Amino acid sequence: MASKDLLSCVHTEDYPNKFISGRINEEQRRTTGCPWSKGIVRCCRYETGGTVLAAQVAQQRGLACSTAGGTHHAFPSYGSGCCLLSHLAAAAKYLMSNSSSKRRILIVDLDVHLFYDGACPPPVRCRQMLPAFPAVTK
């Protein structure tokens, strides 16, 4: 289960405390699209902890998988779009903080977003950002 300390590395110090204790106002609940409950808090914290554990295993063994996830659209100070905690950011921050070597981490987001203004998903757009990433050209 993700600790408050781990969550505070990627979220504002206040947000995890409010989320865990249920001090989320109605506007924030509408933004997330989820009602608050102790069960949701527990689920999100286990999901985040599981993603961090999968990242540790991948670092040690070269590959790992976590079936929990997909709730990575939370912002530092609030949840958004049914995403209450940013588990991928927590895992990336954990790896960067606990690695002896300087590592870069790439998170590729390939999920489908169905927005409120239409029934069709938006097209997938892949962009190559050069020369910001010169390794791509080699």
Image (cartoon, rainbow, N blue to C red):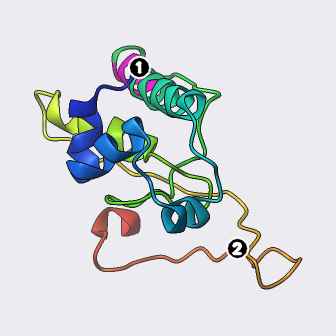
- State the residue at coordinates (38%, 69%): 137
Q: Foreground: 103 or 42?
A: 42
Identify residue for label 1. 1
Residue found at the far bottom of this picture: 117
What's the residue at 73%, 62% (across, down)? 112
Query: Residue 134 sits in which quadrant?
Result: bottom left
Q: Position of residue 85 (x, y in %)?
A: 45, 45
- From which residue to which does the magenta span run? 54-59
**Separation of residues labelled 2 and 1 (CA atoms):** 33 Å
Label 2 vs 1, first from the N-terminus = 1
Quarter residue 114 falls in: bottom right
Which residue is at 15% across, 34% downward?
Answer: 97
Q: Select label 2 or label 1 by which is in front.
A: 1
Label for residue 124? 2
- Residue 56 belongs to magenta span: yes
Instruction: Specify whether residue 13 is painted magenta.
Output: no
Q: Position of residue 31 (x, y in %)?
A: 56, 67
User: Which three-letter amino acid code belongs to the residue tagged 1?
Assistant: Met
Q: Nearer the viewer, residue 29 or 134?
A: 29
- When the figure is inspected, residue 60 is found, relative to residue 119, above or below; the finding is above
Residue at the far left: name it.
100
Circle 2 SS class: loop
Q: Compared to 85, does 42 lie above or below?
A: above
For the image, the number of numbered tags is 2
